[in-house]
Image (cartoon, rainbow, N blue to C red):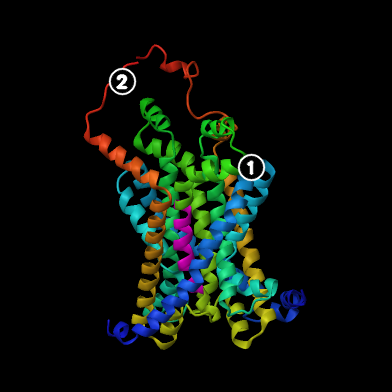
Amino acid sequence: MTWVWENLDLIWDRTLDHLILSVPPIILSFVIALPLGWLANRYRLSRGVILTASGLLYAIPSFPMFIVLPALVGTTLRSPLNLVIALTIYGVALMVRVVADGLASVDADVQRSAVAVGFSAWTNFWQVELPLSGPVLLAGLRVVAVSTVSLATVGAVIGAQSLGSLFTDGFQRGIQAEIITGIVATVLLALLLDAALVAAGRLALPWTRARKAVKADARLRPPVEVTP
Amino acid sequence: MNIFGDALGWILDPANYAGPGAIPVRVLEHLGFTFLTLVVASAIAIPFGFAIGHTGRGRGLAVATSGGLRAIPTLGLLTLVALWIGIGLGAPYVALTVLAIPPILAGAYAGFEAIDRGAIDAARAVGMSEAQILTQVEIPLGLPLLIGGLRSAALQVVATATLAAYVADFGLGRYLFSGLKTRDYAEMLGGSILVILLALALEAVFATIQRVVVPRGVATTRLPVDRARSARPRPGMEPAITKGNP
């Protein structure tokens, strides 16, 4: 524990570095995955192409990805941008499938009703499909957040500063406490971002909370006999 | 594109096909390590997963531990174990086996849980013993999901084995680290391309196995999903069995 107290500044700096690396990919992957997921859900052909491509991208190990990307997009190896792009690719690869599944889970009757009362495809997406698939999207985004925070540490091996730097530095200098601190800090940061997403979900999807409350309420009351 | 030409030149350079650090040697090290880790992790995870799936007990504990393990950064675990037991192959084996267990465990019990309870009840009703139910009903039907778990474990192990070169002199990750150190971009990029090809090849192999192990009866009875059909039953559309069954 003494190592932690003596190095609070270092831990704080690396935590900020880590946030800068991991928050933009989480937001970007949601924004990019929305249209791609919609497209994957809409047409059979685009579904095959998009889901196969995202599956293959997700299979690429992170360390080689960090090295190949600069050659493809012209960023420098150690720049935060390089890591942000790589982490966004992983986030999108995970999220596209979630968006496609979420949109597919929307009740066909509800969609038909929306069309029947005159919703255009555009308003139908924003006001019916997107809100109704909200809980599925939120669950997917939480997985993306936890895996992004964990993956960002790998950037340390190419020299990009993050909480992962505590692993490489601790290993080279033989300080066990530094590595353990890094692991704990990474897990805590993941939990923090996860909690933030849950809170954002409560704000954005207030009806899911209400439905849970109704369910809990219903359990307390004796079941009502329904006469046909 | 010139950089990629250099990397390709590095991959094809005959000088990289001789000596202890030759490309084929590194590929075999990488593959052998991945294989052995998966075998050990499976030997631990599959019996537990089957027990959880068969009895339905201990599921909460398994979900909690595998979820918690997944949040742990691989590089952190790797360097920590390396400090404990020293530089060399021991640390990567321990760290990666620990990382490979959760997805295999989840695949094993999820495969059992996904089975239609009716199939298991029917097996019991025709007089199968618990052992027969396990080996002739649950394991064959749960196999595709178990292979799916092995597939994600394999991906994770191949990827992290690259990082393991940080604490041990082995595998394709060696090229990435030595290229980083000497600022030899062709070597780093060439090594990266080899790792990516290896990962994609493994992914393809597991995807094929996953398709092949689906029992024939399951594969043929699966109906094409009609997405346009309403999920809600309408009057007159209920399955016949509910009629006359108040």
In the image, A79: left or right of B78?
right
Discs 2 and 1 share one subunit: yes
Q: Residue at x 56, y 70 (%)?
A: A84
Bounds of the magenta span? A139-154
Q: Is residue B172 visible?
A: no
Q: Position of residue B218 (x, y in %)?
A: 54, 34
Which of B29 and A198 lies nearest the eye of the viewer?
Answer: A198
Which of A73 and B204 lies nearest the eye of the viewer?
Answer: A73
In the image, B170: left or right of A182?
right
Is residue B113 depicted above or below B4 in this figure?
above
**Tag 2, which chain?**
A
Q: Position of residue B164 (x, y in %)?
A: 50, 74
Q: Position of residue A100 (x, y in %)?
A: 57, 46
- The quadrant holding residue A169 is bottom left
Is residue B8 depicted above or below B117 in this figure?
below
Q: Position of residue A81 (x, y in %)?
A: 58, 74
**Total numbered labels:** 2
Determine if the magenta segment contains residue A150.
yes
Q: Which residue is mark 2?
A: A226
- The quadrant holding residue A193 is bottom left
- What secondary structure do most residues of the magenta stretch adopt? helix
Q: Residue at x 42, y 76 (%)?
A: A15
SS class of the residue under badge 2? loop
